Amino acid sequence: MNFRNEYVTKLNINVKLGMPIYHWKIYKNFIFMLYVAIEENNNIVKKYKTKIKKSINQWFQHHIKLKTWSYLNQKNLISFKKHRILEENIINDEFSQFKFFKKGSYYDLK
């Protein structure tokens, strides 16, 4: 809004010195055009501010979902690895028992 103050001072000087009517009309049209352009730009800025706020909120919601799914995925991977290790231990224990019984040293029932 500094342009208004600048032009008001120039207008006051020109009016005191004597300003033709066509200069006054040109001045009024120029100020009106500036005002309209500023209002349009302010409306565009407001529109994009709301759009940006909406997008940021949407991003936060998706980010929270992503963090939740990542956490659940990590828990599932840990559970899966524990289950896999348990299965391997069971298989190894059964294999060890099978080897021990196959030798027939102590539990051979023949």
Image (tube, helix red, strand yellow):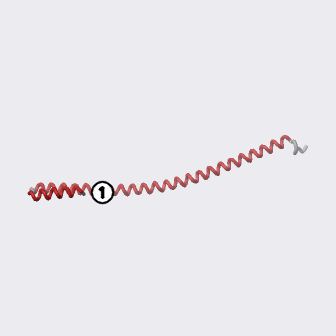
Q: Secondary structure at mark 1?
A: helix
Q: Is residue 10 left or right of residue 87?
A: left
Q: Is residue 1 left or right of residue 87?
A: left
Image-quadrant location for residue 50: bottom left
Q: Quadrant of the N terminus?
A: bottom left
Under mark 1, the amino acid is: Asn
Viewer-nearest residue: 7 or 103 = 7
Viewer-nearest residue: 102 or 2 = 2
Image-quadrant location for residue 91: top right
Q: Position of residue 32 (x, y in %)?
A: 20, 57
Figure disc tally: 1
The residue at the point 28 percent across, 56 percent down is 40
Q: Quadrant of the C terminus?
A: top right
Q: Is residue 97 left or right of residue 77?
A: right
Q: Position of residue 105 (x, y in %)?
A: 87, 42
Viewer-nearest residue: 27 or 15 = 15
Q: Position of residue 49 (x, y in %)?
A: 36, 56
Q: Residue furthest top?
A: 103
The residue at the point 29 percent across, 55 percent down is 41
Q: Position of residue 102 (x, y in %)?
A: 83, 41
Image-quadrant location for residue 23: bottom left
Q: Residues within 10 Å of mark 1 (few under 14, many from 20)?
A: few
Q: Is residue 104 above or below residue 59?
A: above
- Name the residue carrying label 1: 42
